[in-house]
Image (spheres, grey):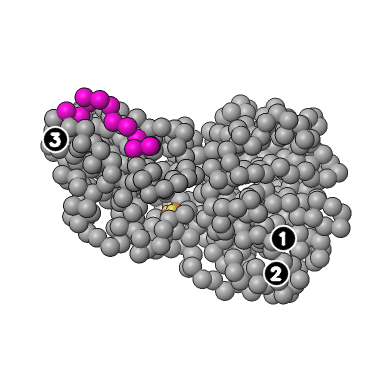
Amino acid sequence: MCGIAGYFSRTGADVASQVMLSLYSEQHRGQESCGIAASDGKIIRLHKAMGYVKEVFSQQVLHQLPGAVAIGHVRYPTRGSSVLLNAQPYVIETLGGPIYAVASNGDIVNYEEISRWLQTRGVHLASTNDGELIGRFLVYYHEREGLTIPQAIRLLMKKVKGAYSAVFLTRKELYIFRDTYGFRPLYIGEVGDDVAVASESCAMDILRPGSMREVQPGEIIVVTEHKVHSSTQMQPLFEENSQPTRHCVFELIYFARPDSSQFGEYVYDVRQKIGAKLASYDDFDADVVIPVPDSANFMALGYASAKGIPFNFGLIRNHYVGRTFIRPDQYLRDESVRQKFNPLKDFFNNKRVVVVDDSIVRGTTIRKIIRMIRGAGAREIHLRIGSPPVKYSCYYGIDTPTREELIANNMTVEEIQAYVEADSLKYLKLEDLKECVHEPVNFCYACFSGQYPLPKELSAPVTQDEVR
Ligand code: SF4
């Protein structure tokens, strides 16, 4: 998943703190590592480490990152292992010193090919993450082939396929761009005379921008001391601009914070609509509707409102158990759901409960949750899932397991119901999911349908003709 942020001060003030605030608001997008690169106009300084934003960026560390322009990143690994080498931003040293930095959210589909092609040009990657590949591609074409940075980004958009919302930093300029499909979200806004950028609108809100908007798919924005320049004001990017957008619908279902806007939608609103759709499938009475917190909260609220059944929180989530939680032995692994969720005492006694969750991936977690609720006294448990069955892996920046590990790829809905030990199980229908957004044609649904906007393997050699 991952989240990115950036800030450009027109007054010359240090901005690492602003980037830290945005990253802190995006912590849900990545908890493995984080980093900030800041330019003081001469060199770029970097600090990155494994762990949470608040732990990594003390005031002392922020003071060591002076500069009026900075970018940052929170990482949830998809490509590349969870080690500091793969943390972002990625700073690229040249003969002029550390004068470029990049941070990106997404996955590049033809990474291997572009990586091999760069190696044939003597450009070697130190890490295995997509951010470095993007940065080295741009620096190669800028420094060695003489392209301007916007020209290099255009070439990248033509040749490097997949999902990337990215920020690229030079000593005095900030470049903001998004792949032509618009898989991952990206916002830009004005904070007084300054410019801020972040993956989610909630990470902009913290800076109180006077205005903000989504960076358009395929758009390139250049921020300098004097102006903000968008590719929409330049010549057309290339003929493929007519290609459709493919926003990740799973951002709305699960990844994004409910107080964010994305792809023209309010996340909380989409989730409530999903809940209402699920409610329309049922004609039985239940005593209470509960979410698996937090991502299903608004879905359960939408279900309960539509049915007139009381909504409540039967499970309390420990917010200090993150995805990176390390389970040191088998006993703790088995207890992992208990570490994250605890049922309210005497809440479930003899109740007929509707449990709403956003999705089922392997099925092991929801099975433990249902056992926990039944053990707490529930009489009936009806499981409702706010997405269609996840049957296919994602290649665009989400860490889904292999297809073989996805329970919906291996079992029917009836078999899954039996496996998770629910009294009934219903998934959101794909056609109903599409009715929960305003422009359904603009979304990717590949993990449900298997219809990928981009094939997994691509052939995209860069010819010398295309460089100019
Ligand atoms: S495959 Fe699924 S998770 Fe991946 S981008 Fe498409 S909708 Fe999002």
Q: Say the numbered circle drawn on residue 118.
A: 2
Nearest to viewer (mark 2 / mark 3)? 3
Residues drawn in magenta: 338-349
Residue type at mark 2 is Leu
Residue type at mark 1 is Arg
The kind of secondary structure element at disc 1 is helix
Asked if the residues shown at circle 1 and circle 2 are in contact, with their CB atoms under 8 angstroms apart, the answer is: yes
Q: Is residue 24 above or below residue 366?
A: above
Horizontal and vertical percent position of residue 84: 64, 50
The picture quadrant where one finds residue 452 is bottom left
Quarter of the figure with the C terminus: bottom right
According to the picture, the residue beneath numbered tag 3 turns out to be: 379
The picture quadrant where one finds residue 180 is bottom right
Residue 244 inside the magenta-drawn segment: no
Relative to 439, 25 lies left or right = right
Foreground pick, 383 / 435: 383
Q: Earlier in the sequence, mark 2 or mark 3?
A: 2
According to the picture, the residue beneath numbered tag 1 turns out to be: 136
Residue 344 inside the magenta-drawn segment: yes
Q: Is residue 171 above or below residue 353?
A: below
